[in-house]
Amino acid sequence: MASSNYAEGGIVDGNIKINPLGSLTPYLAPTSVDAQVTSLLQENIVKRIIGTRPESYTAALGALLFKRVPTFFAGHECQWYEMPDQRLAMTVDNGSSAAGTVLTAATAPVSGGYATANMPVGAAAFAAAGINKRMYFGGGGAVIVGKTAGTPNTLQLKSLVAGAGIPAIIQGASIPVGAEIRADGERRIVNHERYSLLKRTNLITNIAKAREYGRREWLEATNGATTDFIPRSMDELIWNLKADAMIEVLKGVKGFQENDNGKHTPTTDGIETQLINAGQAPIQCTMGNLIPVFEDVLHNTGLKSSNTKLIIAQTRLLTELGKQYKNDQTRYAPNDMVANMNLKSIVVGSTTAVLMPCDILGDTNYFGDDGGKRVYVIDENAIQMAGQKGMPYMDINGAVGKRLLSFTDPMGSRDDLFTTPVEMTFAPMVEGPENCSMLDVDGLY
């Protein structure tokens, strides 16, 4: 065999040329940078699993798994930080009065000077208050936070300019905070802020299916070539692995499962579980109020998002959603022979909702009685998938075994069996739960 010689350091720019941006090479976590041998193999494995019949059943799985390049971790735990919105308005609160109570009447202007007033706030607002920051009352009034005074949760306000008054201070009012204004020649930055990071973790799970024949049985089915039983059974195996993955990606619950042989294995929190843990419980609605609730969800989840939402639901529910967005004139024209009931996306304000059929949700064998009414509103940048280094993101029959730990004993087995495994190793990380939501729609049929 001919040999190849390379300059010191290996192939020049080898990684850049072999692994072009957007390639599928990193998806299966190769442990070697030399991916020339397996890049096409890995791409075919992805197509083989994701492209198995019928695609409308699990079209959402490919988007969730491959919308963004997965992040691979060294062990079975993945970690990430959430950055929740931490801006707080100053809410007037003396701890006892009813909302709307005037605690302090409007403070009159001071001729040639600044008016002052005290404003009670809660502990969270007090901690977030900053000296020399502006606060803006409704109706145009503005004040400066001069200093804290009196009880620990009281702010002292000063009118924005000389000769101006301060509006009335009313229990429950939320007053937004502006910037810290610096004067020319300032030697200081008065307010130093530290933001809390919300650390999330999940476990990376490994799911697998396998078919197994005795060697002679398998050879009889293969050599006879009288039917397509062998390849068709493989299609069914892959299809069921994909269905398993869909269930775990959405419904999974994190923990260490004890199997029947006493061995423990990590299981992963699914997207639905993480959303509920983050306070995004499913919103109940009916076919009658679906549109206003749906649009409200799109607007409420638009904060700090990509403004593109994946609307994952069964086709019949997406059809009803689409029909309600089409009046008679847009569904039909006088000479039309066919009514077009299909919508691929809906633009609501600045948010684009991409309709993504996932008919497996309506199959009670996979998602029970409640899956058919569930609508997942997922921001396209809110989900990041995780894998484990050295473990296949997806594999068929150990095809990437040259790059990964082998699924079976490489020395073979004393059992006279022919085993074909398929497997996936993954975990969803919901980085922006506030940009996602779920609907439960009653009364579809």
Image (cartoon, rainbow, N blue to C red):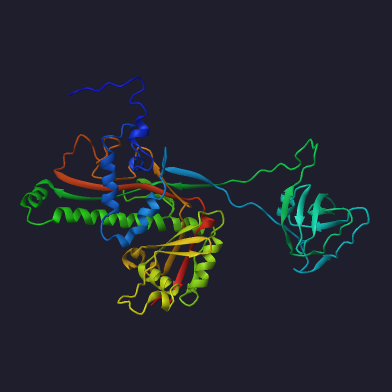
Check the image and name the residue furthest to the front: 335
- Residue 346 visible in this rendered orientation of the protein: yes
Is 89 drawn above or below residue 97 in the view shown?
A: above
Image-quadrant location for residue 441: bottom left
- Residue 266 visible in this rendered orientation of the protein: no
Q: Nearer the viewer, residue 97 or 286?
A: 286
Residue at 50%, 54% (x, y): give it. 306
Q: On the rendered structure, is 351 left or right of 59? A: right
Is 421 drawn above or below residue 298 in the view shown?
A: above
- Across and down, in percent, residue 151 comes to 82, 53
The C terminus: image quadrant: bottom left
- Across and down, in percent, residue 391 comes to 34, 40
- Across and down, in percent, residue 117 comes to 86, 57
Q: On the rendered structure, is 196 left or right of 4? A: right
Q: On the rendered structure, is 144 left or right of 445? A: right
Q: On the rendered structure, is 417 left or right of 406? A: left
Residue at 14%, 56% (x, y): give it. 229
Residue at 70%, 56% (x, y): give it. 89
- Across and down, in percent, residue 404 comes to 30, 37
Q: Nearer the viewer, residue 297 or 148?
A: 297
- Count how many numbered circles sit on residues in the image: 0
The N terminus: image quadrant: top left
Image-quadrant location for residue 95: bottom right
Residue at 94%, 56% (x, y): give it. 111
Check the image and name the residue furthest to the right: 111
